[in-house]
Image: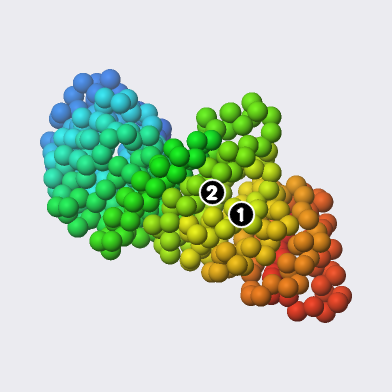
Amino acid sequence: LETLSLDDMTLEPSLFASLAHCPQLKTLIVRSDVELSPALIQDTAALKWCMPSVKELQVYSHDMHLPLVGALSGQLLHLTMTDTGFAERGSWGAIAQCSQLRSFRHDDGEVDPPLLDALAGLSHLRQLKLSEIRGVTEPIVLPDSLVDLEVGSIDASSMQHLLPSPRSASHLKLWHLSIGVSADATVSAGTAGRAASALQQWMVKQRFSWAGTRMSCSLTPVARRAAARAGKPSHALAASMRAVFGALAPLQGHVTKLLLLTDTGLTWQKLTATDLQALGRGLGGRLKMLILPELRVAPNAWQAIFTELPALECIQLHSMARVDAPALTLFTATAPRPLRMQFCRPSPAVCEAVQHIQEVIRVQGVVCKVQLEIMGAD
């Protein structure tokens, strides 16, 4: 027996005593519906004598699983923790005790600063995978031994504190960078610029790669509430978004997929040519996919898509409530290069307009380079 997975049960000391007869047991998996009996909690120190060969531990949910980590800390090489939002902020001492740990994986939950502090002291750690980093306000210290760092999602405020160590050759693999946009253009651009500068430091050393190749720009909760109270779209928010695009210029050529997260009526009324010009100057060089949820497109923006975003291959328009049919028809018929335009879950009016354009183009025999697609229509 090399791998044991425990599910839907209460663990008693007698179970682990029997595992002493399994000297080849290397991996222990403890699922979320597994509980530790009071007797076991009082005697977790004896577990390492029952499972001397276990080098890998996977625990799911429930704060009572942390005693297992502490009991095996001196021998673990690989540790995976899923849904670790259960852990209290002062409870990461068990992680800090895993002095031989080579890899740590944190799934499905935000990483808090105390956990990062605990990981920083692991001098043998080589592989680190973190699901989400947010709200970090101090420099993130990485172990000098680290080789591979993979981050699922990180906000711009935290990204500025995630810098490559001059004493290690660690490589950062990032899935998603989230840029928050407030009504204060100076603050928004400053945060985005510092995050871009941090990423650039990884890129200069050729120690960075995108995994999801996705960056998103979205309103901060404060800006969202302020715009909602105003009862109308805010021009200041549009200006902030354009300022953020400009601050991201150090990443020109390194971002191929951008998601603009918006709320209907809470950013700007329409995406304009001016917005696309700012986006083009900031990130447009190699941008291949642009995702625009719940955002109207101004007539003058259609042609700017081609002139400002020369590498764009696909644009997704989510949950559009209305569309300027004549402008879209002209854009579709006169496009200078191929482009896929996907309307995802459009309103019935938009769906009808797109289908009408498709039919007009078919009947007139116009050869179009823009491919209109309707996805997930009601």
Q: Indicate whether 63 appears above or below 106.
A: above
Question: Hey, what amino acid is under mark 1?
Answer: Thr
350 sits left or right of 248 in the view? right
Q: Which image quarter: residue 205?
A: bottom left
At horizontal 52% and vertical 30% (from top left) the residue drawn is 222
The Cα–Cα distance between marks 2 and 1, rounded to whole angstroms, is: 8 Å
The residue that mark 2 highlights is: 242
Foreground: 88 or 345?
Answer: 345
5 sits left or right of 47 in the view? right
Residue 262 point in image, percent of width and height: 60, 43
Marks 1 and 2: in contact by CB < 8 Å? yes
At horizontal 40% and vertical 58% (from top left) the residue drawn is 251
Q: Which mark is residue 97?
A: none
Residue 292 point in image, percent of width and height: 61, 52
Residue 171 point in image, percent of width and height: 27, 57
- Tag 1's secondary structure? helix
Q: Is residue 147 visible?
A: yes
Residue 41 point in image, percent of width and height: 24, 23
Q: Is residue 82 visible?
A: no
Total numbered badges shown on the rendered structure = 2
359 sits left or right of 217 in the view? right
At horizontal 33% and vertical 35% (from top left) the residue drawn is 136
Q: Which image quarter: residue 148?
A: bottom left
The residue that mark 1 highlights is: 274
